[in-house]
Image: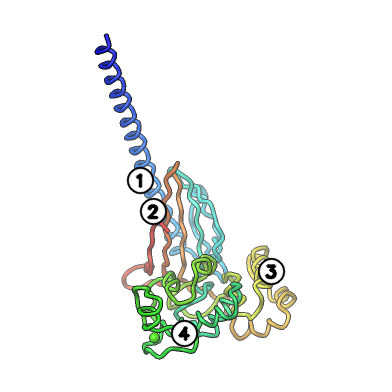
Amino acid sequence: MVFVLVVCLILLSGAAWVVQMYSENVEATGNIIYKMEAEVANESAMQLLQYAVATGTFTSSSVLGNIPREFGVPANIRLDGSRYTAKLPVKGETTFSLQDLAGCFNLFFAARHDLARFLAAAGLPFEEVAVIKDSFADWKDSDDLQFPNGAERWYYVQDAQTGYKPRNSIFLQTPEEFSLIRGVKPEYMQKILPELTITPVGGYNIQTMGPLGLAAVLGISEDEAERLVALRRARGHFVTEEMETVLGSARERLTISGFGFPSQAVRFHVETVVEKARSTIRADVLFLEDELGPFRVLTWAKGL
Ligand SMILES: [Ca+2]
């Protein structure tokens, strides 16, 4: 009798184990399918948006695209990072934003004093700004001569033992590379990364620029820049007379440093969620037609 009971218990626990394995496998299979569906939908959305921009018309603050209404892509897509939801004929929910890269703070061209204004606008303490702006200059210049508050090879290898050396070139590889520079903390990166670019396209576009960039370019506080961005969002673009009221004396700087032309280099953020699976693409694309095609992908990152 006891023997029969023991056998039954063994059989029952074996069956429970098989059922558990089976349900875990089913769940894993389901997750993989969701992930595949999210990837396919997201890639499709990216293709559609690239087509919309490539065949559309740039204005100072947006792209006028030609996508059929049923795709849920607006005819007038703002280039200031505004978030949209697309209604594509695929599974899941897709959201996207487009950012004109002339509306970002460009690390490729930025001088030390430009960077200092940008970081100050982001709320960094004066003494930390001094370290980062000098270290940034050292990171890009080809020599090993250190600025007063900077950092060259000796600091990264010996003092901080980071395991890397400064690039000693102006050609940073990604905006995230800025996080490797002495004094740049993760919380600072979190705040400034959406407004950073390394793409060598010239000029600033105040019609698409974020608050930190505006504060740096116009020499105004972040609060004033936030008010300007809110005004621009309400209006669709800046109107000169209104800006004079908001800007006051900073208006003079605008005539010197402000431009109203998009770069035709656009950062895409596209994300699709299917059940528990998520697919994201961040890509910088230059829409200048050449012998190779209607646009050129400058950077392409997934899963950020
Ligand atoms: Ca250097």
Asked where in the image residue 19 lies, by quadrant, the reply is top left
Kindly identify which residue carries mark 2.
Answer: 43
Residue 56 position, x and y percent, is 48, 64
Q: Could you give the CA–CA distance between mark 3 and mark 2, rounded to whole angstroms?
A: 36 Å
Q: Which mark is residue 150?
A: 4
Earlier residue among tags 2 and 1: 1
* Amino acid type of the residue that numbered disc 3 sits on in the rendered structure: Arg
- Ligand 1 is found in the corner quadrant, namely bottom left
* Amino acid type of the residue that numbered disc 2 sits on in the rendered structure: Glu
- Could you say which is closer to the camera, residue 232 or residue 161? 161
**Residue furthest out toward the right:** 245
- Could you say which is closer to the camera, residue 236 or residue 8? 8
Mark nearest the camera among 1 and 4 is 4
Asked where in the image residue 10 lies, by quadrant, the reply is top left
Earlier residue among tags 4 and 2: 2
Kindly identify which residue carries mark 1.
Answer: 36
Earlier residue among tags 1 and 4: 1
- Look at 37% across and 41% down and name the residue there: 31
Earlier residue among tags 3 and 1: 1
Q: Secondary structure at mark 4?
A: loop
Q: Secondary structure at mark 3?
A: helix
The C terminus lies in quadrant: bottom left
Kindly identify which residue carries mark 3.
Answer: 227
* Amino acid type of the residue that numbered disc 4 sits on in the rendered structure: Gly
